[in-house]
Image (cartoon, helix red, strand yellow):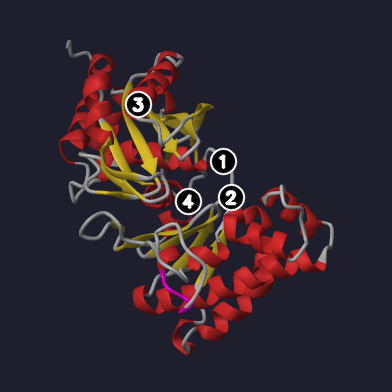
């Protein structure tokens, strides 16, 4: 371990921090990653815009941006390529190791990036292969919630656990499942679609085409629709107005969130029974109103669990809009730990680029 550490120090990937106090022997040397040793780019795609982040090798955000984007355009891949190139051009001097892309849908393999997405209206869109060819860079594509789960495994609450569940609430409802330290993808990359668990026989129409899915009751559009129908907000108002009303003490607005929390809690109890996670981590733009969701969630969740599961921890993390793109960038930064080779050839290219950029600092010519 000492020799490996020396090698990483000489290659400029690790740096010495302060010494920890001695406990009777030599003072321990604290080490940290050199954030400027490399960078990764994260891209978050939704139907009407694309968000970008540039992160250091330690995951810290260097810069971010957001651009309008039409996912239904016949030229969507060409349009996206232009936007990505523009963001790359504004980057710093640290080597770009690769690009991670998070999408709301199913992805066949990270290294290939063939996407199906009901939310985007996509069927077999060759996102990964197109960007790889046009940019001549490693590109990894993943379901956006799976990407968040990978980021949690590296930097968040999930770094303390081998088995956990990441649940996102907001525009849609999704889940990332980590089992024995590895994100579970399923046979076609679509594991974790908890938003499409059927919760009612005759419910509202869902974006997937079925009726009565969880998302059709508690997704952002459903909450807004309910609030409009009950006269809590105006016909042209959105989720921000509903949240503001609840924050201002409007009991009807608070009740809508509480009802959503109740249904989410009962549904997730079933998921916990199935997967037995150590912790459930709740994320997403919907957590901005979690103080209102929680009134319904906590009692419904706990009372629906079997006695041996009632102690499972629930962590609600603060939310920033760039978190989605930061999760996508984590796809690139996770490749050195990719023991299951989920990233394939693209992951190996990322690792090669990391080694190449470190070589000059160790005195070996390229």
Label 3 or label 1, whichever comes before in sequence order:
3
Q: CA distance from mark 3 to mark 4?
A: 37 Å
Q: Secondary structure at mark 2?
A: helix
In the rendered image, which residue does mark 1 sit on? 321
Label 3 or label 2, whichever comes before in sequence order:
3
What is the crowding at mark 3: few (fewer than 14 residues within 10 Å), some, or many (at least 20)?
Answer: few
For the record, the magenta segment spans 197-201
**Is 288 situated left or right of 215 in this image?**
right
Question: Which mark is on residue 301?
Answer: none
Outermost residue to the top: 365
Residue at (25%, 20%) from the top-left corner?
134
146, above or below 345, in the image: below
Q: Quadrant of residue 196?
A: bottom left
Q: CA distance from mark 3 to mark 2?
A: 29 Å
**Is 118 situated left or right of 341 in this image?**
right
In the rendered image, which residue does mark 3 sit on? 75
Mark 3 vs mark 4: in front: 3
Could you tell me if the residues under marks 2 and 1 are in contact, i.e. CB atoms within 8 Å? yes
Mark 3 vs mark 2: in front: 3
**Is 67 situated left or right of 76 in this image?**
right
Q: Quadrant of residue 250?
A: bottom right
In the rendered image, which residue does mark 2 sit on? 285
Q: CA distance from mark 3 to mark 1?
A: 26 Å
Image spot of residue 121 (x, y percent): 38, 45
Mark 4 vs mark 1: in front: 1
How many numbered discs, if any?
Answer: 4
Image spot of residue 59 (x, y percent): 44, 36
């Amino acid at each position: 371990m000492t020799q490996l550490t020396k090698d990483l120090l000489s290659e400029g990937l690790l740096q010495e921090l302060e010494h920890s106090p001695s406990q009777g022997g030599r003072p321990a040397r604290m080490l940290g990653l050199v954030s400027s040793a490399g960078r990764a780019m994260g891209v978050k795609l939704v139907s009407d815009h694309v968000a970008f982040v540039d992160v250091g090798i330690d995951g810290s955000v260097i810069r971010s941006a957001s651009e309008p984007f039409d996912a239904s355009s016949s030229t969507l891949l060409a349009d996206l390529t232009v936007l990505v190139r523009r963001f790359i051009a504004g980057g710093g001097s640290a080597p770009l190791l690769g690009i991670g892309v998070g999408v709301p849908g199913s992805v066949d393999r990270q290294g290939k990036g063939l996407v199906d997405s009901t939310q985007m209206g996509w069927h077999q869109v060759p996102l990964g292969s197109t960007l790889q060819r046009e940019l001549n860079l490693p590109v990894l594509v993943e379901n956006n919630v799976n990407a968040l789960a990978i980021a949690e495994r590296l930097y968040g609450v999930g770094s303390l656990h081998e088995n956990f569940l990441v649940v996102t609430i907001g525009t849609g409802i999704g889940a990332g499942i980590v089992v024995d330290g590895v994100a579970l993808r399923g046979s076609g990359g679509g594991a974790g679609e908890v938003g499409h668990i059927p919760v009612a026989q005759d419910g509202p129409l869902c974006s997937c085409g079925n009726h009565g899915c969880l998302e059709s009751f508690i997704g952002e559009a459903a909450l807004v629709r309910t609030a409009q129908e009950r006269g809590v907000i105006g016909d042209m108002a959105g989720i921000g107005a509903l949240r503001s009303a609840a924050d201002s003490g409007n009991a009807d607005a608070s009740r809508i969130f509480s009802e959503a929390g109740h249904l989410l809690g009962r549904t997730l109890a079933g998921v916990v029974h199935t997967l037995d996670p150590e912790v459930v981590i709740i994320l997403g733009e919907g957590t901005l109103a979690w103080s209102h969701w929680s009134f319904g969630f906590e009692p419904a969740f706990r009372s629906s669990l079997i006695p041996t599961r009632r102690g499972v921890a629930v962590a609600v993390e603060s939310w920033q809009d760039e978190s989605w793109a930061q999760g996508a960038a984590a796809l690139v930064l996770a490749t050195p730990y990719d023991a299951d080779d989920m990233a394939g050839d693209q992951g190996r290219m990322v690792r090669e680029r990391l080694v190449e950029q470190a070589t000059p600092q160790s005195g070996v010519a390229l």
